[in-house]
Amino acid sequence: MAKQSAYYEIDGQKLIRVTSVLGQTLAKPALIPWAKKATREGAVTYLKTVTQKSWETQEQEGDRTPVCGQTCEQNKDQGWIPVTSPFKSGHDVPPSHEECDCKVIYQVLDRADFIKEVGQAAKGGTDITAATNRGRDFHEAAMDYMGGDPYPDIPGMQALKQWRSDYEPRPVALENVVYSRKLGCAGTFDALMEIDGKRVIVDYKTGGVYDDHAIQLAAYAGMWGEMNKGRPIDSCQVVQVDTVNETYTIHRLDDWKPYWEDGFLPLLKVWKQMQGKAFISN
């Protein structure tokens, strides 16, 4: 079996991925604000890295001699310093009084590099990529750990270890592909666990949890039921892991069938109507 682009190919049949159906039919209201925030943070971080500041005395008009007190002199003696570093006096800007004609000036270390890097930050690359990589690394480690590999020491694993200790899940299937030839779709869930005698589809996430995740898990549960008659899914849950504080939150979906029947199946019909066959062009 080979997975190609937005599709799975199973025994020669192309099956659309569950996540592709949802991604092309549902809006992601939380994604744009998150991307904008990550972009801003990336740009601010780089600006602080490449920018310097210096405490200077301003030239005055006419014959008046610029005034610069002892406090200002020690700041001037520092020369160019990183914009995030403090001046010796503790001031961020010169105090406003008659005995000070000073100002703070700024410069960029290398304008060419500055323009290039801020352009990349504006595309949302730095922080968004880092968040994606953290989620991917955790997911891979979680699958290995739940499959019996030694405990990996990466952020988030202490929380997962605690969840495992608290609920004692028994792995039934890990990263298992489920599909429906009749519906023409497929997907891969993280884990099927037996918890307190019930079959539970489990999804691990290090980011936010939203309602469309319920539809996604319900789709997996529905297709599992078609493939495994007599062994239906009892429940679904998302284990949301905080990789900073090493805590977890369980988001349960005990009644998943409405999200399958009234959620995913209608969306799949909508997706099929969006495949460029509505109009006849001439």
Image (cartoon, rainbow, N blue to C red):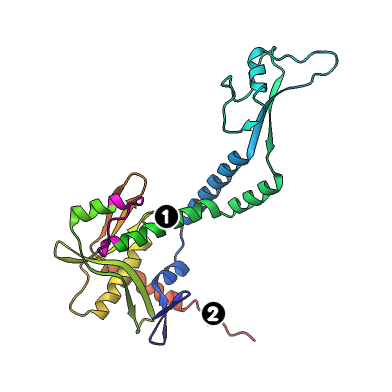
Image quadrant of residue 191?
bottom left
Task: Name the residue: 64% across, 52% down.
Answer: 119
Specify the label residue 276 is tagged with.
2
Q: Left or right of 171: which side holds 118?
A: right
Above or below 69: residue 169? below
Q: Is residue 149 magenta?
A: yes
Of residues 65 and 40, the one nearer the viewer is 65
Q: Which residue is mark 1?
A: 134
Looking at the rendered image, the quarter that the N terminus falls into is: bottom left
Q: Residue 203 — which label? A: none
Which residue of the protein is positioned furthest toward the right in this rendering?
Answer: 62
Q: Main secondary structure of the magenta part?
A: loop
Number of marks present in the image shown = 2
Mark 2–mark 1 Cα distance, whole angstroms, equals: 36 Å
Q: Is residue 122 visible?
A: yes
Q: Residue at 33% of width from left, 81% of height from top?
A: 180
- Residue lying furthest left: 197
Q: Is residue 55 left or right of residue 48?
A: right
**Closer to the N terminus: mark 2 or mark 1?**
1
Tell me, yes or no, whether the highlighted magenta stretch contains residue 157. Answer: yes
Instruction: Quadrant for residue 204, please give it.
Output: bottom left
Residue at x-position 37% and y-position 57%: 138
Residue 144 x, y percent position in the rendering = 31, 63
Front residue of 33/120: it is: 120
From the viewer's perspective, tell me whether residue 81 is left or right of residue 208. Answer: right
> Residue 240's spot in the image, x, y percent?
32, 54
Image position, residue 281 (x, y; %): 62, 84
Percent position (x, y) of residue 265? 35, 74
Left or right side of 160 for 207: right
In the image, which residues are magenta? 145-159
Say which element carries label 2.
loop
Callout 1, which amino acid? Arg
